[in-house]
Amino acid sequence: MSAEPVPELLARAQGGDARAVDALYAQLYPELRRAAHARLRGGGDALLDTTMLVHESYERLAGQAGLSFADQSHFLAYAARAMRSVLVDAVRERLAEQRGGGATHLALTTGLGERLASPDEPELLRVHEALQELAAIEPRLAQVVELRYFGGLANDEIAAALAIGLRTVERDWERARSFLFAALR
């Protein structure tokens, strides 16, 4: 059984065919795993494994209506955004559990609570918040970082997804890195 060409699947997915999204994920699964693995590699305290991240991002994408994929790069860009969302939600959930989860909180009136050092936020949340700041100033720079950091795309793939030149992607990446370096310091 031969696989349906990706452009035809993209067209069917745009038309609202849920099975086309399923088939896209199946055909692009190795590439999606590569992107997820690249994002999770060296993460230390693993929140999710590669397979879980790809499957969770599928659940998020498959549940959305009215998605528009111009080409394979755009589909991968959507998947990168879904992976980012999954990772940020997992970090927030873990932080909520560390802070007592659903336990009743007792307010400290002695000022001791203010003097205790709060633990640093995990890098992922800090990057996410810095990206939100960057998106407010330069949305395209934030997209470049998102596609590279969360989607694992190469510069030429980012250029295709955003319909800009390769050199523009390289300049945007350098500008975004400078902004993020300053924001995360």
Image (cartoon, grey):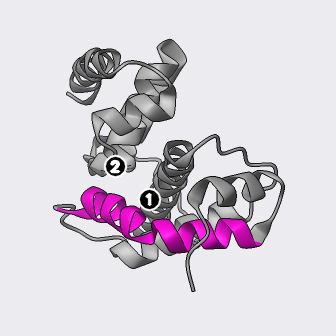
Q: Do labels 2 and 1 touch, CB within 8 Å?
A: yes
**Residue ranking furthest to the front:** 2
Residue 174, position as x, y percentages in the image: 23, 19
Magenta residues, dominant SS class: helix
Where residue 87 is drawn, which disc sits there? 1
Check the picture and name the quadrant holding the N terminus. bottom right
**Which residue is at the front of the view, 17 or 3?**
3
Task: Describe residue 47's horizontal placement relative to residue 86 as left or right.
Answer: left
Q: Is 54 colored magenta in this rendering? A: no
Residue at 32 percent across and 18 percent down: it is 172
Image x and y of residue 98, in percent: 39, 68
Decide if residue 111 is in sight here. no
Q: Residue at image x 74%, y 64%?
A: 63
Disc assigned to residue 124: 2
Tell me: residue 131, above or below residue 46: above
Q: Which residues are magenta?
A: 19-41
Of the numbered discs 2 and 1, the one sitting upstream in the chain is 1
User: Tag 1, which secondary structure?
Assistant: helix
Residue 132 seen in the current view: yes
Of 23 and 67, the residue lying toward us: 23
- Amino acid, disc 2: Leu
Residue at 74%, 48% in the rendered image? 67
- Of residues 110 and 77, the one nearer the viewer is 77
Q: Amino acid at mark 1?
A: Leu
Residue neighbourhood size for the residue with mark 1, other residues' Cα within 10 Å, grouped as few (<14), some (14–19), many (≥20): many
Q: Is residue 39 magenta?
A: yes
- Is the residue marked by circle 2 packed among few (<14), some (14-19), or many (20+) residues within 10 Å? some
